[in-house]
Amino acid sequence: MVGREKEVAALERAAASSKSEFVAIYGRRRIGKTYLVRKTFGPRLLFSHAGVENIGMEGQLRAFRSSLRDAGAEPNGKIANWFDAFDALKELVRTSKATKKILFLDELPWMDTPKSNFVPALEFFWNGWASARDDVLLVVCGSATSWIVRHILKARGGLHNRVSEQLRLQQFTLCECERYASELGLEMSRLDLTEAYMALGGVAWYWSLLRPGISLAQNMDALFFDPDAKLGLEFSSLYASLFKHPDPYLRIVEALGGKGKGLAREELQKACGFQESGKLSRLIDDLEQCGFVRRYTPFGASKKGTLVQLLDSFTLFHFRFPKEVVKGNPTFWTSSFGKPANRIWAGLAFERICLSHVGQIRRALGIAGVASGICSWSVPGKDGRHGAQIDLVIDRDDRIVNLCEMKFCDGPYEVDSTEAERLRANREAFIRETGTRKAVHLTLVSPFGLKQGRHSGVFQSVVTLDDLFRI
């Protein structure tokens, strides 16, 4: 299994514990939650059940009974409700001779149908019985991250503080995607891997759909633009699986989709037409938990100046190349390769990759052990002075600030006199407007580094793709 070493270790610790453990795993659709559990425990699973999408309580209970039979149990009498269902599960545990009884409940939110009393029954099972034993490992997970967070991780009722381990599955890094691509037999350069990451993010299942033996551009057409595109309906399914009412979330990400640096809370509330400020906060929290957006405070700003920025590569790709624009062109990506729209998207998408690989950038700069803040900074033009925007600022405790310029290109980045003047002006504006007393270094982050020339000295440090692909 590629990656997930920390998560596997956490699950194995729970399985080896001398007391009963309750583990909650959450993360976006297709991120590999079920695969992680099944791959880690395999035949050690005493009981495994997955909720069924879009069916009522009667259907859920029927499916649960079927899973009990698959595990070798024969429930006595009718399972009329979830309390009966968990009573039958208790009997399975009692008769098992396994040292640790590992129970896996997948897609938990789907089981919680209206008026089913699923959560109270789960509370009663854990609090009133399983937690009093020393041999039960209960693992629960679900794609509906907001449900898991509210009803399990931040529960106010009987499950409050009952979870002993919570595992949030993040997307693969570039390094992990490279390893996975190799396992899939995909012969891809690091530049191609990076471009694939710009559209697919680090979601392993999306990568599993790439076909060996054809170009990345051909793969992109097959995944997104062909009439039978494998990911043609994934965007709507993604948000519908994560959120019971996806429309307000889609309004937020759509509003952010065209804003590179993001929007302030008030701007976002106005753009989406939300009346309640509290509701917007909850929606942003949910999106942040899923890794779709990030909140950050620009350099020198107060908390009131916090911005919300779209971070998810897959979502950004959807809004940059919507179906209505490319409809009827099954080779859209192959034919648009290198054109302006593609280049603009690539620049934005590469910035998102850098923002999600800040740890690798810090290690490349040799400051992995130096405390530092990560933010952005911008200033509007005024009094005849040009405005400036820096999308990645690393504010270091060793009295240095790195202003990172992120440039995506297929060769060494070349700085001409105009660009060098712009970069120096940005640096001077940053020093002037922020009043910083730290040394300010310009840093280039670009796939193949910097082409040496008359103006290349404007950068004090350079980070390349090889740096971003490190663990």
Image (cartoon, grey):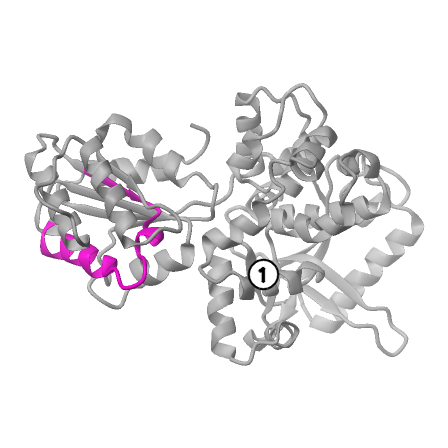
Q: Quadrant of residue 305?
A: bottom right
Indicate yes or no whether the magenta region holds residue 112.
yes
In the rendering, at what x and y percent does residue 194 appear?
66, 36
Span colored in magenta: 102-129
Residue pictured at 9% horizontal, 44% vertical: 77
Crowding near the residue tagged with mark 1, few <14, some 14–19, many ≥20 C-alpha atoms within 10 Å: some
Residue pictured at 71% horizontal, 48% vertical: 323
- The relative height of residue 290 versus residue 436 in the rendered view (above or below) is above
In the rendered view, does 373 fall on the left or right side of 254? left
Q: Quadrant of residue 272?
A: bottom right
Indicate yes or no whether the magenta region holds residue 408.
no
In the rendering, at what x and y percent does residue 281 appear?
49, 71
In the rendered view, does 432 fall on the left or right side of 401? right
Residue pictured at 15% horizontal, 45% vertical: 20
Q: Amino acid at mark 1?
A: Leu
Q: Quadrant of residue 248?
A: bottom right
Q: Nearer the viewer, residue 91 or 37?
A: 91
Q: Nearer the viewer, residue 64 or 250?
A: 64
In the rendering, at what x and y percent does residue 52 appear?
35, 45
- The relative height of residue 147 versus residue 273 in the rendered view (above or below) is above
Which residue carries the number 1 mark?
A: 250
